[in-house]
Image (cartoon, rainbow, N blue to C red):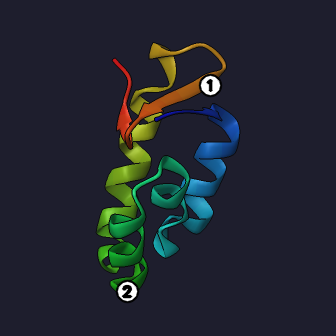
Amino acid sequence: MEKSINKVTFLIIAFFLGELGVDRFMRGQIGLGVLKLLTCGGLGIWQLVDFIIAITKTGKYGDDFIFIDGQWKE
């Protein structure tokens, strides 16, 4: 399944709510979202890594990020 999420919205949510796994839920990765929620974003490390990955991918797409089955569309 393909999901399209606005870049700015995704980055803001990944920064502020990434510790709760909301960014993973938005991507459709429910299991990883729950795991991220239970570990408080991997004690903040997982949250930071996901946020940095999202920032590095901002130049590769138009106005939206495209996810197919939870994975970044290349």
Q: Quadrant of the C terminus?
A: top left
How many numbered marks, from 0 up? Answer: 2
Asked whether the beta carbons under mark 2 and mark 1 sit within 8 Å of each other, the answer is no
Count residues near mark 2 (Cα–Cα under 10 Å), then give few for <14, some for 14-19, many for 20+.
some
The residue pinned by badge 2 equals 38
Residue 27 in the image: state x and y as whole percent. 48, 48
Residue 24 in the image: state x and y as whole percent. 45, 57
Camera-side residue: 60 or 33?
Answer: 33
Determine the residue positioned at 52% across, 15% down. Answer: 61
Secondary structure of residue under mark 1: strand
Residue 69 in the image: state x and y as whole percent. 37, 40
Determine the residue positioned at 32% across, 80% down. Answer: 43
Instruction: Tell me the quarter of the picture where residue 57 sits.
Output: top left
- The answer to which of marks 2 and 1 sits earlier in the sequence is 2
Please, which residue is most extreme toward the front here? 1
Determine the residue positioned at 45% across, 33% down. Answer: 67
In the rendered image, the vertical position of residue 4 relative to residue 26, given as above or below: above
Which numbered tag is attached to residue 64? 1
Count residues near mark 1 (Cα–Cα under 10 Å), then give few for <14, some for 14-19, many for 20+.
some
Secondary structure of residue under mark 2: helix
In the rendered image, the vertical position of residue 7 relative to residue 29, given as above or below: above
Q: Amino acid at mark 2?
A: Leu
Q: Amino acid at mark 1?
A: Asp
Instruction: Tell me the quarter of the picture where residue 32 sits.
Output: bottom left
**Mark-to-mark CA distance, 2 and 1:** 28 Å
Determine the residue positioned at 37% across, 31% down. Answer: 72
Which numbered tag is attached to residue 18? none
